[in-house]
């Protein structure tokens, strides 16, 4: 038991969830390492949602509202620490949820599919027969469900690998990445990068989605046009620098 008054309580609870997911057999060992990398960057941004992340969230939600076929991509880490928040967001935005595992095994897919089913959700990406190769690229990083990401115009990814992000962007999809590391290839590759922890970003996305859903479409288009991901990523790096100077 982690005492509630422990100064690193929330962080330790997340580690616990990651450990449980590993023990349950649906999170790969490298998923634990990826989580550790995330923790480092979360320290550097001050474990809070920085201003540039709020901005990226707003632009992401505008993009998801205007999308024809938006899909939220999930992996073992996302399921381990933010499954309920992801389901809530998908309902507000009318998004499908698709599973994409870097280290895909039948067992991991089955466990995750079952967890979603127990919450009333049928996820895409679980059935091998429904998977196609994006742009015909014969790589496990390029598979997508023909009813989901394969045909999606906007894809929300988190803890994504740079190679896959590149494939998605090159296929003409708009990629929104939640990635605590503003220097990762995924962060640089994505059309919109939210430098924040998924456990904070996703609930905030839901709140903003409820708000922006009633806004005029032209307003949403305008804020998207005025946004530069490169500039916004620079602001994220500045936030880290100023945090370190304090
Ligand atoms: P790339 O291939 O894009 O350069 P990478 O190989 O560094 O990235 P991975 O280790 O495959 O990336 O994926 C982990 C990424 O996800 C890291 O950038 C890490 O900072 C980020 N990350 C880890 N945990 C979280 C979290 N809870 N919320 C948001 N991002 C996270
Ligand atoms: Mg990588």
Image: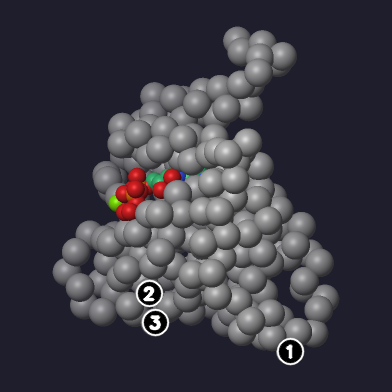
The secondary structure type at the circle numbered 2 is: helix
Q: Residues within 10 Å of mark 1 (few under 14, many from 20)?
A: few
The secondary structure type at the circle numbered 1 is: helix
Q: Quadrant of the C terminus?
A: top right
Question: Tag 1 or tag 3, which sits nearer the N-term?
Answer: 3
Q: How is the image coloured?
A: one colour
Question: Tag 1 or tag 2, which sits nearer the N-term?
Answer: 2
Q: Quadrant of residue 160?
A: bottom left
Q: Residues within 10 Å of mark 2 (few under 14, many from 20)?
A: some
Image point (40%, 54%), residue name: 183
Q: Quadrant of residue 118?
A: top right
Residue indicated by mark 3: 172
Image point (81%, 79%), residue name: 215
Residue 236, x across and y down, in percent: 55, 55
Q: Residues within 10 Å of mark 3 (few under 14, many from 20)?
A: few
- CA gap between label 2 and label 3 equals 5 Å
Residue 163, x across and y down, in percent: 28, 61
Residue indicated by mark 1: 218
Residue 240, x across and y down, in percent: 55, 46
Residue indicated by mark 2: 169
Residue 13, x across and y down, in percent: 58, 24
């Amino acid at each position: 038991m982690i005492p509630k008054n422990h100064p690193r309580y929330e962080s330790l609870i997340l580690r616990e969830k990651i450990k449980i997911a590993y023990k349950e057999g649906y999170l790969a060992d490298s998923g634990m390492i990826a989580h550790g990398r995330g923790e480092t960057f979360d320290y550097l941004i001050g474990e809070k949602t920085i201003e540039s992340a709020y901005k990226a969230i707003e632009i992401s939600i505008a993009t998801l509202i205007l999308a024809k076929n938006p899909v939220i991509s999930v992996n073992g880490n996302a399921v381990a620490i933010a499954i309920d928040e992801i389901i809530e967001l998908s309902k507000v935005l009318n998004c499908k949820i698709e599973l994409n595992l870097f280290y895909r095994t039948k067992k991991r897919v089955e466990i995750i599919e079952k967890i979603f089913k127990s919450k009333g959700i049928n996820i895409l990406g679980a059935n091998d027969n429904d998977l196609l190769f994006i742009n015909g690229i014969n790589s496990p990083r390029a598979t997508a469900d023909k009813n989901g990401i394969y045909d999606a115009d906007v894809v929300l990814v988190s803890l994504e690998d740079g190679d896959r992000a590149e494939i998605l962007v090159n296929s003409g999809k708009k990629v929104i990445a939640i990635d605590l590391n503003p220097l990762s290839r995924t962060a640089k590759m994505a059309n919109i990068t939210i430098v924040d922890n998924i456990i904070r970003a996703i609930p905030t996305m839901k709140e903003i989605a409820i708000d922006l859903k009633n806004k005029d479409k032209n307003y949403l288009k305008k804020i998207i046009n005025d946004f530069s991901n490169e500039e916004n990523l620079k602001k994220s790096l500045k936030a880290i620098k100023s945090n370190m100077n304090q």
